[in-house]
Image (cartoon, helix red, strand yellow):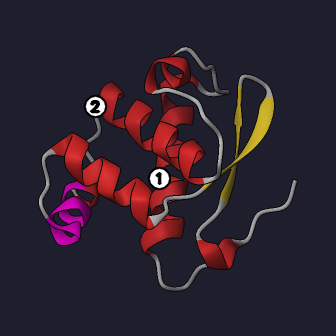
Amino acid sequence: MQVNHLRGEILAELDGKKYCLVLTLQSLAELEKSFGDDTLESLVQRFSAGKFSSNDLIKIIAVGLRGAGYTYTDEEVSEMRVDGGANGYVAIVSQLLNATFNSENG
């Protein structure tokens, strides 16, 4: 599976399968609504703090999957396993956020 880093796509392994994840504008709007942020800037500030709850990790991974066209619910994502346990989930989220907000993708 290939991903387009210029579009902010990443490759992640969940439950032993490789998936493309991307945060689209719709994905970001879903995160704003879910986290109660009213602007993209406040969402970025939230992420920049680097403090994520387990629910934050689930939501971000789930919207990243949905942004790439998968139909997984947050509940289904919460049951997925990754190598590295909690650190593995954090690594996926960090990579996805860097791909989305770092202007030097690729």
**Extreme-bottom residue of the structure:** 104
Q: Is residue 42 magenta?
A: yes
Evaluate whether residue 7 shows in this view.
yes
Q: Secondary structure at mark 2?
A: loop
Residue 44 position within the rendered picture, expressed as x and y whole percent measured from the top left: 25, 65
| In the image, residue 20 above or below residue 97 | above
Using the numbered discs, state the Cα–Cα distance from disc 2 to disc 1 in whole angstroms. Answer: 13 Å
| In the image, residue 84 above or below residue 13 | above
Quadrant location of the C terminus?
A: bottom right
**Extreme-right residue of the structure:** 1
Mark 1, other Cα within 10 Å: few <14 / some 14–19 / many ≥20: some
Mark 2, other Cα within 10 Å: few <14 / some 14–19 / many ≥20: few
Disc 2 marks a residue whose amino acid type is Ser
| In the image, residue 15 above or below residue 60 | above
Q: Give whichever of 9, 34 is nearer the camera.
A: 34
Mark number displayed over residue 94? 1
Residue 34 position within the rendered picture, expressed as x and y whole percent measured from the top left: 24, 41
**Magenta stretch, overall SS:** helix
Residue 9 position within the rendered picture, expressed as x and y whole percent measured from the top left: 64, 63
Mark number displayed over residue 53? 2
Q: Give whichever of 73, 51 is nearer the camera.
A: 73
What is the magenta range?
39-46
Q: Residue at x 49, y 37 (%)?
A: 62
Q: Is residue 18 magenta?
A: no
Disc 1 marks a residue whose amino acid type is Ser
Residue 27 position within the rendered picture, expressed as x and y whole percent measured from the top left: 42, 54
First along the sequence among labels 2 and 1: 2
Q: Residue at x 57, y 58 (%)?
A: 22
Mark number displayed over residue 36? none
Relative horizontal placement of residue 30, taking residue 13 as reference (left or right)? left
Relative horizontal placement of residue 56, taking residue 18 as reference (left or right)? left
The tally of labels here is 2
